[in-house]
Amino acid sequence: MDGIRTRWYKDAFIYQIYPRSFCDSNGDGVGDIRGIISKLDYLKELGVNAVWLSPCYKSPNDDNGYDISDYRDIMDEFGTLEDWKEMVAGMHERGIKLIMDLVVNHTSDEHPWFIESRKGKDNPYRDYYIWRKGKGKDGKKPPNNWTSRFGGSAWEYDEASGEWYLHLFTKKQPDLNWDNPKVRKEVQDIVRYWLDLGVDGFRCDVITYISKREGLPDGKFNIGAVGDEHFTHGPNIHKYLNELFTEVLSKYDCMTVGEAAGVTIEQAQLYTDESRGELDTVFMFEHVEVDRYFRMFPKKLSLPRLKAVFAKWQLGLRDKGWNSLYYENHDQPRSLKRFTGDYGNLRKEAAKMLAISLYMQQGTPYVYQGQEIGMTNYPFKSLDEHKDVVIRYVRKALGVFEPLLRKVVLKVMNIRGRDNARTPMQWSAQENAGFTSGTPWINVNPNYKEINVEAELADPDSILNFYKKLIAFRKNNDIIKYGNYKENYASHKDIYCYERWWHGEKLFVLCNFKNKPVEFKATKDLAYETCELKLHNYGYDRTAPEDMVLRPYEAMVFLIK
Ligand code: TEU
Ligand code: CA
């Protein structure tokens, strides 16, 4: 490789901001860039050294910014490019890098390219998107059976030209045609534009979908995801990523993380192998799918299955590739309850345990806004309270059956719904959790009086202060960064116990995932001279990983030499 690129992301702790719900500076009920600027000191004190910012580009907001109409400017509701520049400068002053969301599988249907493309078959932009003739005598049937990830056909008919365009998400998110070299050149220019403005990296939205199989063949039966095998890790994906890397990314000291639902270890190695020059890291999804049937319907969490996924990835990317560690993001429900079951009055203990269980692993850690104060799912009482565009698609799919199924759909969406993570950040016990002085675009979780930043800053024992300690502990910790991984008691239903070791030092991590006392038997082969308790969610009163009865959600980390 060219040697310019450093691997700074291996020492990063990344905080994800969903700008719409983070902090509103002007009282219009929508979070914005000046709101982020006002919280930069908060981020610095938390100790994170990078931010992944969900899309803040111009957008009609069909999918909250994941539908971009101008890649080079800021969404009106969020502020201006000048505000953005001030934000980046403020981040860099505080030693915080900025990773922008790169959404280039699709644009908005209001992007000038699509507006042109739609004008007719001869338009020079026609081939920027994926247009096809329909099936059937009159061409009124979609070109193939692929489904949108949000439900329904992935094709939309255009009366004027009598052709269909492909959209793997909403019909306002037409897929770009990456087989067109002009499209790839446009993407390179966009990426270069932001890197030149000082951006430090990109989270690449659904990047594994960009290359579609020639001929767009019908997909096999697959609940909720027909066509997957023809566009996930498609035929030219590695070529296109390598081209973007060679032409642009390799020339900057930046990092990339590709969103890669369904990725296997073998594919992840290909994407992230440094000698190939594609992506730096990927987000795998396996651990957030262990409690789902068909990646969709809620299923009881099995701890052994979750641990098996962690072990597989920790070992699988050990020497080749690099893991991304996350429990939450803007598409996932909150991790509390999901991974801990009913925590009763032990929210703090449960949240700290989850942090220990994940962040002692090897990889780049991500924390999603609100996770650091233990925010919880929202108690939605009706489908109308869900703002997510996904709900619109779900309701459409239900059609006349909606009244019949409403209760069960609400139940599923309350467990799974993306809006669980999108309620406003809870800053204080003031009205609207201190998020806005106006009317928030989405309801604030009613528990904000109890769960908020201000209260947690004041409580030395809070989840927030625990995160600070954990983040500081991870920093420059070579055992966490380089150490080997070994799991103990893999089939244990309640306990997650793993070791990391490096150059004669070891971290011993012990977590009780259940809201009940659980007996722990010391591992036999553990020899040591000194043993220090480094992190603990109950009073720091343990001396060694010996036989003991773990308290509900008790978790600890020992440094053993
Ligand atoms: O998500 C891609 C994706 O696969 C999601 O559909 C995910 O499976 C789903 O949200 C889980 O419920 C990315 C973005 O993160 C998401 O916010 C966007 O809606 C989507 O791409 C389209 O850009
Ligand atoms: Ca605002």
Image: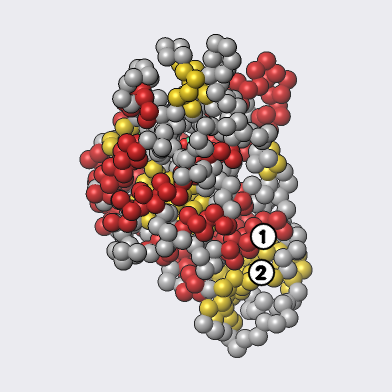
Q: Position of residue 264 (x, y in %)?
A: 59, 53
* Secondary element at image label 1: helix
* Secondary element at image label 2: strand
**Residue under pointer 2:** 487
Residue 527 visible, this orientation: yes
The circle drawn on residue 454 is none
Q: Position of residue 192 (x, y in %)?
A: 27, 47
Look at label 1 and name its amino acid: Lys
Quadrant assignment, res 395 = top right
Quadrant assignment, res 378 = top right
Residue at 35%, 48% (x, y): give it. 244
171 vs 124, left or right, is: right
**Residue under pointer 1:** 307
424 vs 535, left or right, is: left
Query: Does the closest atom of ligand 1 sit within 8 Å of the Cβ of label 1?
Result: no
Residue at 36%, 24% (x, y): give it. 126
Q: How would you rate the neighbour count of disc 2 (Cα within 10 Å): few for under 14, some for 14-19, many for 20 or more?
A: some
User: Where is the C terminus found, in terms of image quarters?
Assistant: bottom right
